[in-house]
Amino acid sequence: MNKLTRTTDITTFSDIRQNLRTHINRVKKSGRPLFVTKHGKAEVVILSAKEYDSMSAAEFRATRAQIRRGRADVKAGRVKPLDQAFADIRAAVGLSGKKRKAS
């Protein structure tokens, strides 16, 4: 899924409470997300329904393509046992093969 591009469309929770209708109309008209901040940090993003649907559809298409690639890998034999895959990952990140005790 694509990350949302940060824009200058930023407001605060206080401003949202006072001007919700104005902000919603602007988001719907512009199609751009509105970042809402709390204490200077982005907390939520408001999107138009159209933009949300577009992002959801893109995510679905990407997931479906990944599943197709995975099935093709299985069919072509480009797979390995799970234990071997984890061992390869541990080696790649420099972890020992020892298992940790459950907490």
Image: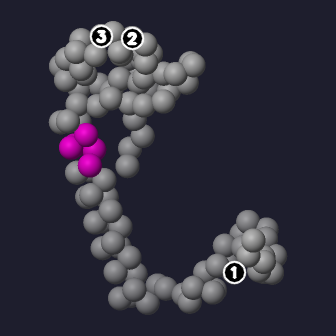
Say which residue appears at 43% left-offset and 13% top-offset: 14
Q: Which secondary structure dominates the residues rendered in magenta?
A: helix
Q: Secondary structure at mark 2?
A: helix
Tell me the magenta residue range. Answer: 52-56
40 sits left or right of 98 in the view: left
Residue 79 versus residue 5: which sits nearer the camera? 5
Image mark for residue 98: none
Residue 24 versus residue 8: which sits nearer the camera? 24
48 sits left or right of 1 in the view: left
- The type of residue carrying mark 2 is Asp
Image mark for residue 87: 1
> Pointer 3: what residue?
19
**Nearest to N terminus: mark 3 or mark 1:** 3
The image quadrant of residue 101 is bottom right
Binning the other alpha carbons within 10 Å of mark 2 as few (below 14), some (14 to 19) or many (20 upward) gives: few
Single out the mark in the foreground, 3 or 1. 3
The correct choice, above or below, for 35 with respect to 54 in the image is above
- Asked if one can make out residue 91 in the rendered structure from this viewpoint, the answer is no
Image quadrant holding the C terminus, namely bottom right
Say which residue appears at 57% left-offset and 19% top-offset: 39
Residue 4: x and y in percent read: 40, 35
> Pointer 2: what residue?
15
Q: Secondary structure at mark 3?
A: helix
Say which residue appears at 30% left-offset and 10% top-offset: 19
User: Colour mode?
Assistant: one colour
Query: Pointer 3 and pointer 2: residues touching (CB < 8 Å)?
Result: yes
**Nearest to N terminus: mark 1 or mark 2:** 2
Residue 77 versus residue 100: which sits nearer the camera? 100
- The type of residue carrying mark 1 is Ala
